[in-house]
């Protein structure tokens, strides 16, 4: 049980870090830029919200299979399969939780008062300075929400990680899958504990999200 | 010589402004909706415009040649009606934003000039509107701009401090010899500060008056040729 919990936590942590790095430029593009294919990009980012996890898992599995371009390249570099590995699960989790990271950041960036962005421009801040000194501090609530939701959502994955990871004990068997196995094997005491732990993690993460959102309402009020 | 020749259309406003001016203090007046703020925003590079702009010996815009200097590189010091101070930074950090390393001497001088020295370590939320406006002025001038664009920068100031601020702003303009374009409805601003007085109506520059003002004396105003 502990082993599967540890894998879940590790997966959620790695996924969240990678997601924050990927989601920020995406959120910036979607918040401020108009370009051809914008709507398409927004749809692709939002797809995991409605796609059955097994469908996403299936496509990721096809994409990272050893005979695919990505999977083949991975195999030749690291000399091991990307499919049914922890790294493969990370790839799938990043895609699966993408909207949970991009959308809060996009909304937070859109909520920055235009006067602050214009001030950054006329004060001569370049894009990097404007990002680090104005936009990110102003949108830090959104970044925090993105991190909390990505983490919680990855902890709660089932279909995608089962499909891509293959439930290998000690490597890709995460807590949610372990719980399923426990119920199947009628280990109800252990199942209870694990279920309660997963519930607690989700509860804490969502509490954080709501606390940030409530505080966020008066962030823009300062002159 | 600075040169403005721009046109833009924004909603009901059809802005068409042509003018040449020296590095002087210019007061812009006109009714609400005449395009005063829009003109300043065009100069700052915050609006889409057609035409030519040359300010401070630098080409800012030449839409025929497809050239436009982005606002970040115009070195304009702007004060808008919204002070736009970042609430998580101290007043001091707001003023020096993006301009490291800090010139402490210059910062202290500006803090004294705009009477904000006791506020430097505070957060914007603790300031009155008038104080925030003076911080915005200090921020605009701190980075030694090549032009000042001020949209009613004294509107939230008490009458007593207004006159002091006018004189200090005037001495700043004389010291740095940069063009200052300031929107104001206050006749005192025009009397004390203006080398030139522009009046706008419906997006056009109606008349530019050259003023030879002496504090206390009657402004000897003389109408000059209507700029194109």
Image (tube, rainbow, N blue to C red):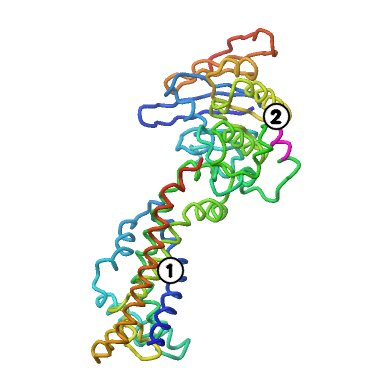
Marks 1 and 2 sit apart, C-alpha to C-alpha, by: 49 Å
The answer to whether residue B69 is visible is no
Q: Nearer the viewer, residue B24 or A36?
A: B24
Q: Is residue A114 magenta?
A: no
Q: Which residue is mark 1?
A: A19
Q: Give the mark count.
A: 2
**For mark 1, does the 10 Å Cα neighbourhood hold few (<14), some (14 to 19), or many (20 or more) residues?**
many
Residue B14 image point, x, y percent: 40, 26
The residue tagged 2 is B172
Same chain letter for marks 1 and 2: no
Q: Secondary structure at mark 2?
A: helix
Residue shown at the point (68%, 24%) measured from the top left: B170
Taking the image as drawn, is residue A214 in sight? yes
Label disc, if present, on residue A33 of the rendered structure: none
Q: Which residues are magenta?
A: B108-112
What is the magenta segment's predominant secondary structure? helix
Front-most of B54 and B149? B149
Residue B65's spot in the image, x, y percent?
51, 40
Q: Relative to residue A132, is residue A177 drawn left or right? A: left
In the displayed structure, B219 sits above or below A28; it is: above
Q: Is residue A223 left or right of residue A151?
A: right
Residue B224 appears in which quarter of the rendering? top right
Q: Quadrant of residue A81?
A: bottom left
Q: Quadrant of residue A154?
A: bottom left
Q: Nearer the viewer, residue B218 or A1?
A: A1
Q: Image height check: is A91 above or below B218? A: below
SS type, badge 1 = helix
Residue A204 position in % (x across, y down): 39, 68
Crowd rating for badge 2 (residues with CA inside 10 Å; few <14, some 14–19, many 20+): some
**For this view, does B165 lie left or right of residue B40?**
right
């Amino acid at each position: 049980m502990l082993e599967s919990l540890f894998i879940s936590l590790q997966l959620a942590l790695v996924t969240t870090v990678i997601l924050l790095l990927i989601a920020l430029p995406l959120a910036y593009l979607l918040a401020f830029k108009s370009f051809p294919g914008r709507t398409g990009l927004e749809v692709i980012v939002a797809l995991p919200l409605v796609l059955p996890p097994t469908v996403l898992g299936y496509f990721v599995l096809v994409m990272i299979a050893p005979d695919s371009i990505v999977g083949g390249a991975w195999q030749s570099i690291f000399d091991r399969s990307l499919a049914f590995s922890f790294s493969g699960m990370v790839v799938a989790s990043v895609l699966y939780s993408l909207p949970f990271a991009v959308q809060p950041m996009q909304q937070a960036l859109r909520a920055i008062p235009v006067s602050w962005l214009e001030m950054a421009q006329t004060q001569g801040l370049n894009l990097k300075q404007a990002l680090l000194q104005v936009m990110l501090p102003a949108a830090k609530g959104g970044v925090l929400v993105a991190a909390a939701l990505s983490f919680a959502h990855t902890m709660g994955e089932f279909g995608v990680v089962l499909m891509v990871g293959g439930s290998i004990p000690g490597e890709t068997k995460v807590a949610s899958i372990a719980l399923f196995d426990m119920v199947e094997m009628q280990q109800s005491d252990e199942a209870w504990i694990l279920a309660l732990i997963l519930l607690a993690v989700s509860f804490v993460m969502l509490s954080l999200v709501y606390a940030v959102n409530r505080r966020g309402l008066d962030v823009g009020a300062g002159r | 010589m600075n040169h403005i020749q721009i046109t833009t259309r924004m909603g009901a406003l059809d802005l068409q402004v042509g003018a040449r001016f020296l590095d002087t203090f210019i007061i812009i007046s006109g009714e609400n909706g005449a395009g005063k703020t829009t003109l300043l925003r065009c100069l700052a590079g915050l609006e889409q415009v057609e035409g030519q702009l040359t300010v401070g010996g630098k080409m800012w815009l030449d839409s025929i040649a497809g050239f436009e200097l982005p606002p970040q590189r115009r070195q304009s010091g702007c004060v808008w009606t919204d002070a736009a101070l970042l609430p998580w930074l101290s007043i001091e950090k707001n003023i020096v934003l993006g301009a490291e390393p800090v010139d402490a001497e210059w910062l202290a001088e500006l803090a004294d000039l705009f009477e904000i020295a006791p506020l430097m370590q505070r957060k914007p939320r603790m300031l009155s509107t008038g104080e925030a406006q003076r911080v915005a002025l200090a921020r605009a001038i701190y980075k030694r701009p090549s032009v000042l664009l001020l949209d009613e920068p004294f509107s939230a100031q008490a009458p007593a401090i207004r006159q002091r601020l006018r004189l200090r702003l005037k001495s700043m303009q004389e010291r740095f010899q940069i063009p200052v374009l300031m929107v104001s409805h206050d006749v005192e601003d025009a009397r004390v500060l203006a080398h030139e007085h522009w009046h706008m109506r419906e997006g056009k520059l109606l008349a530019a008056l050259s003023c030879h003002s002496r504090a206390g004396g009657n402004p000897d105003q003389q109408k000059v040729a209507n700029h194109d």
